[in-house]
Image (tube, coloured by chain):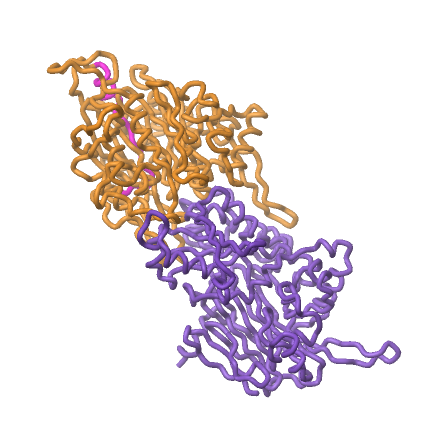
C-alpha cells in the first residue's frame, strides 16, 4: 500500500539549542522534480512510495525549491548553527538564497534566549568577510521570512529585558518590516494577538495536507500567561521568586495540528519538578536551593490549557462509534509527539504533563555546545520510561484519576554529550535513539483514515528518520569532548537515502 | 640579606629576606622563576585576575650595581597584545584592556599603569608600578613611603635608610628589594556587563557583617563562610555546607567576585559585591545560572577574533592557514561570529599578552644651573606572556598558559614619553583606566581551583615545575 507524508517536522540538531522546521510539502512537485532529473538518466528509478520522495531527492541532491507549500521555523538554535539551519532549509527547498523575501516561510521565536534566537540572526544578515587591507567585517541584508512572530515587549506582567542579541534580532526584523520585506507580528501574554489579555490566541495557518486537511499551529501560552479556552482568560504565572526574571517563563507554547496528529512545542517552560508535578521518589529533581535557577511552573497550567483546548472526542458509553470527518482523540490534551521542554531538564517535563499529552514519541533537542547542561537529565528519561503516569487532580475535585499507561513508543534525541569538562548528559539513555536532525512525518493515508473513520480504533502512523549529522569537534578538542554516536539501525540498501532509519510508529485513535 | 624561597602550608611559594631587618616572608605564587636578579611568581588561585609578583634583589650577584647607587629603584611595566606576528592595539582587543589605549605607543606597546586622570589627581609624575597603591592608600604621598614593604602594588628599593620614618608614619618596615604586585585581567567581560546580567537575577537577602566580621577577611570570604554555616529560612542545612572549595572557579571582575560552584550546585555562579554604606558594609550575593553566564560571554570571542583578523589584514600579515582536515569546519561552526578561517581551537598562543617587567633606577644628577634632578636608567628587564586559546565548543577564549619569564631588552623612553604626553593632553582629566585593575592586587585570595595553568617555553614546550624536574 502506498504511503505519503506531506507534513514534515524536522527537529534540527542545533546542539544545546532548539530549532524546529515544519514543512508542508507538495509531493506532486517533488515527484516532478525527481522525474526531471531522472530524464537525464543519472538516477535509479523513482521510489515506489511517495513517502520516500523527499529523502531520495535530498540524497541525490535534487532541487526542491518549488516543492514547499508553507514552512514554519520555530527558533534557530545558537549562533554557530545559524548557517547550518539556513543551508538545511535551502537544501530542503524551504528557502531560495537568491530571494529577499521567502514567501512560504514564517518564523516564530519562543523566547529571547541565545540558544533559541542566536541562529535566526544568520538568516537576516549575510556576513561579508574582510579580504584585504582596510576591509572590515560587515553584514549585508540577508533573507527575510514573509511573516515573523516575536515575543512582545509588553510592560505586563514584567517588562522584557532583552540582551544585545535579542535586541539585534528585533531591530533587524523591524527594519525588514519598514522595508516591506517581512511582516512582524507580536506574541502577547497568553499567546494572544493583542496586549492586555485581549484578543485571540494566535493561529498560524500553514497549508493544506491530504484531503485538504489544514496544518495549523496554535499558541496556548506566552509571556508568563496561559490562555484558558473555557474561560477565555489568561492566567498570569508569577516568577518562581518575586523580583527575579527568567526568559524561560515567557516561552511561547505551540501545538501543531494535522487531522488527529499533533506536535507539542513547549519551548523551555518549567514544571513543578517535584511530587506535586507527579515526579515522585527518584523522578523528582534534586531539591533546589536559593542559588539554583528558578523557573515558574508553567507546565501545570499548560497541561490544563491543553485539556481545555483539545478535549477528547465525545464517545458514547459502550459504543465504538465516532463522528465521521473529524479528528479523533481518546484523551484530552493528547499530542502525538512531544518535544521535551527545556531540552530535557529535570525542572521541566513533569510526569503529569506526560499524563496529559500521552505522546507516542518524545523528541529531545540537546547537545554539546556551549554547554551540555546535563541534558537530557536522567530524571526525564526515567519519567519518560515509567510504566504508568499519574494524573493531576482536576480542578473542582479532590481526587486524582487513576494513573495511565505509558504511551511513549520511542525517545529520539538530537545529540548527547558523553564527555565534557562540565556536565555530560545522563548516563543511561535506555533505548533512546540518537539521531542528529530528527525528521517526524505523519503518514497522510493514516491521517485520512482516522479522519474518515466512523468508529474509534483506527491507527495513525508516524514515520521517523535521522540525518546522522553531529557537531564537528576539532581534533585539538577531541580529548575534552565526546558525543554519543548515532544509535539505531542504519537502513538497509533499499533505503540508502535514509541516513538513519526509517522507523514506523503508530497509535490508535 | 639573601632571599630564600620556601613553601607555605597552603602550597604557595613564599620568599623571605625582602624586608630590612626581618625574616618575614612574602608571597610568590604557585609557580616561580628566578631570572637574573628577579624572582617572579604566578598566582592563579583566581582564574582572573592572575596575580604576578616580582622582586628585584639589588644584592643578587646578577643585579646591576646601579640599583645600589640610585636614589631609588622601582618596577615599570609595559604590555603588548599580539596574534601571530601581528600586534594589536588595546582598543581592538576590547574588554577590560580597551581603556589602556590612552598609553599606546610605538609598535602597539602600552604602559601598564593607572589612568591619566587618576595620575593627575594623585600628582604622580613617574609611572612606576608601586605608585598604583595611591589609588587605595591615602597615606602614601612621597617616594620614601613607597619604600615600605607590603604595599598593595609593590615597593621601591632605596639604599637610603627610611626605617624610622616608615615605622612611624606607616607602621611598616622598609623593603630590601624593588617589587611589583600586578593584576593580569584581560577578560572580555567588563564590570558593566556583570551589572547588566544581575538585573532580575536571584539575590540573597543582603548580608550585614560587622566591622569585626570583616576584620582580616574579604567580603566574599565572609559571604562564603556564612553560606557554609548558616541555614536559610525554611531549611535545616546551610546551602553550601558540603562545598569543596577546590572545585570552585573564582574570578574578579571590577568589584564583583564571581565564584562558579561545582556541577552538583546546579552550575550556579555566585556574584558577591561589598557595598560601603554609612552604617557599615553590606554584602550582596546574587546567583547567575550557566545560561546567564553564557549570555555574558556570547559572541565576544568571535568578535575579538574578527577584529584581530582586520588588524592582520591592515598589517599585511601572513594569515594563519586553515585546518587541513576537510577544509570545512563542519556542523555547528557557521554562525555570524564564527571565527575566521585558520583559528585553530585548543592552540595556546592564539592571542598573546606580553609583559615587560623593567626595573628602573632613578639617580640624582646635577644639572648645573637647574640643580639636581632624578634621571631614570633601566636596569635588566624580563619578559613573560599570558597565552590564550580558543574553544570552538564553548566559543570562548581562555587564558591557558604562561610563557615563562626570560631576560629581555626594552627601552623605557617610549613608555615614559607616552605617560607624559597622556598627562599633558587636553583630555587627561577624563582619561580613565578602571582602577580595579590595580586596587585588587592585594585582595586576599583563598585557594580555589588552581594550578590549571601550563608554563611553556618559546617553542610551546611545557616547562615542568621545579619540584617535578628531574
Q: Would you place residue A486 above or below residue A101 in this image?
A: below
Q: Residue at x 37, y 18 (%)?
A: A232
In the rendered view, tell whether residue A271 sits above or below residue B101: above
Residue B216 appears at what percent x and percent y? 50, 67
Q: Compared to B374, does A272 lie above or below?
A: above
Q: From the viewer's perspective, tell me whether residue A471 is left or right of residue B119.
A: left
Q: Residue at x 37, y 34 (%)?
A: A267
The residue under the point 53% across, 56% down is B281
Does residue A507 belong to the magenta stretch? no
Quadrant housing the N terminus of chain A: top left
Residue A492's quadrant in the figure? top left
Question: Could you tell whether B295 is left or right of A43 in the image?
Answer: right
Q: Quadrant of the C terminus of chain A?
A: top left
Q: Is residue B415 left or right of residue A91?
A: right
**Chain drawn orange, letter?**
A
Could you say which is closer to the camera, residue A71 or residue A398?
A398
* Residue B239 at x, y percent in the picture: 35, 53
- In percent of width and height, residue B213 lies at 47, 62
Q: Which residues are magenta?
A: A434-452
Chain B colour in the picture: purple
Q: Is residue A63 visible?
A: no
Q: Quadrant of residue A92?
A: top left
Q: Is residue B43 above or below residue A256?
A: below
Q: In the visual, does B423 lie left or right of B138?
A: right
Amino acid at each position: 500500500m502506498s504511503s505519503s507524508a506531506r507534513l514534515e517536522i524536522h527537529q534540527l540538531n542545533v546542539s544545546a539549542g532548539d530549532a524546529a522546521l515544519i514543512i508542508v510539502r507538495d509531493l506532486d512537485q517533488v515527484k516532478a522534480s525527481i522525474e526531471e532529473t531522472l530524464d537525464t538518466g543519472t538516477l535509479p528509478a523513482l521510489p515506489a512510495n511517495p513517502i520516500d520522495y523527499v529523502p531520495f531527492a535530498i540524497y541525490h541532491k535534487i532541487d526542491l525549491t518549488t516543492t514547499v507549500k508553507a514552512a514554519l521555523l520555530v527558533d534557530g538554535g545558537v549562533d554557530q548553527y545559524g548557517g547550518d539551519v539556513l543551508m538545511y532549509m535551502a537544501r530542503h527547498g524551504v528557502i531560495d538564497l537568491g530571494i529577499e523575501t521567502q514567501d512560504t516561510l514564517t518564523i516564530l521565536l519562543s523566547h529571547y534566549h541565545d540558544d533559541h534566537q542566536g541562529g535566526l540572526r544568520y538568516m537576516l544578515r549575510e556576513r561579508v568577510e574582510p579580504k584585504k587591507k582596510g576591509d572590515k567585517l560587515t553584514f549585508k541584508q540577508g533573507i527575510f521570512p514573509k511573516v515573523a512572530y516575536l515575543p512582545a515587549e509588553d510592560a505586563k506582567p514584567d517588562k522584557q529585558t532583552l540582551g544585545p542579541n535579542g535586541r539585534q534580532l528585533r531591530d533587524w526584523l523591524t527594519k525588514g518590516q519598514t522595508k516591506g520585506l517581512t511582516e512582524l507580528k507580536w506574541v502577547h501574554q497568553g499567546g494572544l494577538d493583542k496586549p492586555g489579555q485581549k484578543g485571540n490566541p494566535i493561529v498560524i495557518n500553514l497549508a493544506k495536507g491530504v484531503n485538504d486537511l489544514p496544518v495549523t499551529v496554535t499558541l496556548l501560552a506566552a509571556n508568563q500567561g496561559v490562555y484558558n479556552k473555557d474561560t477565555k482568560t489568561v492566567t498570569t504565572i508569577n516568577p518562581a521568586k518575586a523580583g527575579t526574571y527568567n526568559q524561560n517563563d515567557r516561552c511561547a507554547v505551540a501545538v501543531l495540528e494535522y487531522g488527529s496528529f499533533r506536535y507539542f512545542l513547549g519551548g523551555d517552560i518549567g514544571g513543578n519538578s517535584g511530587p506535586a508535578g507527579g515526579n515522585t521518589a527518584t523522578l523528582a529533581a534534586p531539591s533546589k536551593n536559593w542559588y539554583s535557577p528558578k523557573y515558574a511552573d508553567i507546565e501545570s497550567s499548560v497541561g490544563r490549557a491543553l485539556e481545555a483546548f483539545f478535549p477528547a472526542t465525545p464517545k458514547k458509553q459502550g459504543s465504538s462509534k465516532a463522528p465521521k470527518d473529524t479528528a479523533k482523540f481518546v484523551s484530552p490534551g493528547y499530542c502525538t509527539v512531544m518535544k521535551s521542554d527545556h531540552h530535557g531538564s529535570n525542572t521541566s517535563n513533569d510526569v503529569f504533563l506526560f499524563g496529559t499529552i500521552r505522546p507516542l514519541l518524545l523528541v529531545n533537542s540537546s547537545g554539546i555546545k556551549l554547554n551540555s547542561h546535563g541534558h537530557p537529565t536522567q530524571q526525564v528519561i526515567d519519567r519518560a520510561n515509567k510504566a504508568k503516569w499519574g494524573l493531576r487532580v482536576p480542578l473542582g475535585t479532590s481526587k486524582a484519576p487513576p494513573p495511565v499507561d505509558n504511551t511513549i513508543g520511542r525517545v529520539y534525541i538530537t545529540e548527547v554529550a558523553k564527555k565534557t569538562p562540565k556536565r555530560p548528559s545522563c548516563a543511561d539513555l535506555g533505548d533512546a535513539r540518537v539521531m542528529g536532525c530528527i525528521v517526524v512525518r505523519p503518514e497522510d493515508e493514516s491521517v485520512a483514515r482516522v479522519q474518515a473513520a466512523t468508529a474509534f480504533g483506527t491507527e495513525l502512523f508516524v514515520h521517523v528518520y535521522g540525518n546522522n549529522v553531529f557537531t564537528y569537534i576539532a581534533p585539538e578538542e577531541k580529548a575534552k569532548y565526546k558525543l554519543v554516536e548515532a544509535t539505531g539501525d542504519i537502513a538497509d540498501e533499499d533505503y540508502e537515502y535514509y541516513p538513519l532509519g526509517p522507523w514506523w510508529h503508530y497509535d490508535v485513535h | 640579606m639573601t632571599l630564600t624561597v620556601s613553601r607555605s602550608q597552603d602550597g604557595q611559594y613564599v620568599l623571605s629576606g625582602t624586608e630590612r631587618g626581618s625574616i618575614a616572608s612574602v608571597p610568590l605564587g604557585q609557580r616561580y622563576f628566578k631570572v637574573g636578579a628577579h624572582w617572579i611568581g604566578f598566582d592563579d588561585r583566581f582564574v582572573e585576575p592572575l596575580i604576578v609578583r616580582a622582586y628585584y634583589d639589588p644584592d643578587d650577584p646578577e643585579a646591576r650595581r646601579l640599583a645600589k647607587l640610585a636614589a631609588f629603584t622601582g618596577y615599570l611595566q609595559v604590555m603588548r597584545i599580539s596574534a601571530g606576528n601581528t600586534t594589536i592595539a588595546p582598543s581592538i582587543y576590547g574588554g577590560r584592556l580597551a581603556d589602556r589605549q590612552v598609553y599606546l605607543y610605538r609598535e602597539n606597546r602600552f604602559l601598564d599603569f593607572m589612568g591619566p586622570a587618576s595620575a593627575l589627581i594623585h600628582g604622580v609624575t613617574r609611572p612606576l608600578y608601586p605608585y598604583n597603591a595611591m589609588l587605595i592608600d591615602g597615606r602614601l604621598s612621597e617616594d620614601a613611603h613607597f619604600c615600605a614593604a607590603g604595599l598593595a602594588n609593590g615597593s621601591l628599593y632605596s639604599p637610603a635608610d627610611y626605617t624610622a620614618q616608615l615605622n612611624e608614619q606607616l607602621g611598616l618596615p622598609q623593603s630590601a628589594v624593588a617589587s611589583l604586585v600586578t593584576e593580569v585581567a584581560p577578560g572580555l567581560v567588563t564590570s558593566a556587563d556583570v551589572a547588566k546580567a544581575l538585573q532580575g537575577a536571584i539575590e540573597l537577602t543582603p548580608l550585614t557583617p560587622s566591622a569585626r566580621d570583616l576584620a582580616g577577611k574579604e567580603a566574599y570570604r565572609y559571604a562564603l563562610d556564612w553560606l557554609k554555616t548558616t541555614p536559610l529560612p525554611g531549611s535545616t542545612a546551610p546551602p553550601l555546607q558540603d562545598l569543596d572549595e577546590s572545585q570552585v572557579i573564582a574570578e574578579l571582575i571590577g568589584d564583583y567576585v564571581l565564584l562558579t560552584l561545582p556541577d552538583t550546585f546546579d552550575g550556579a555562579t555566585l556574584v558577591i559585591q561589598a557595598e560601603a554604606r554609612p552604617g557599615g558594609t553590606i554584602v550582596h550575593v546574587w546567583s547567575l545560572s550557566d545560561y546567564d553566564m553564557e549570555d555574558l560571554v556570547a559572541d565576544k570571542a568571535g568578535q575579538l577574533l574578527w577584529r584581530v583578523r582586520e588588524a592582520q589584514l591592515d598589517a599585511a600579515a601572513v594569515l594563519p592557514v586553515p585546518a587541513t582536515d576537510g577544509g570545512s569546519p563542519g556542523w555547528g561552526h557557521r554562525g555570524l561570529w564564527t571565527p575566521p578561517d585558520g583559528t585553530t581551537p585548543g592552540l595556546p598562543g592564539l592571542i598573546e599578552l606580553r609583559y615587560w617587567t623593567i626595573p628602573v633606577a632613578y639617580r640624582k644628577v646635577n644639572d648645573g644651573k637647574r640643580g639636581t634632578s632624578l634621571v631614570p636608567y633601566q636596569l635588566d628587564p624580563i619578559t613573560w606572556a599570558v597565552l590564550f586559546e580558543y574553544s570552538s565548543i564553548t566559543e570562548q577564549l581562555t587564558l591557558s598558559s604562561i610563557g615563562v619569564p626570560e631576560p629581555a631588552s626594552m627601552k623605557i623612553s617610549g613608555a615614559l614619553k607616552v605617560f607624559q604626553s597622556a598627562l599633558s593632553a587636553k583630555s587627561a582629566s577624563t582619561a580613565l583606566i578602571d582602577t580595579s585593575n590595580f586596587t585588587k592586587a592585594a585582595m586576599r585570595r583563598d585557594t580555589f581551583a588552581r594550578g590549571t595553568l601550563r608554563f611553556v617555553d618559546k617553542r610551546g614546550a611545557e616547562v615542568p615545575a621545579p619540584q617535578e624536574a628531574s
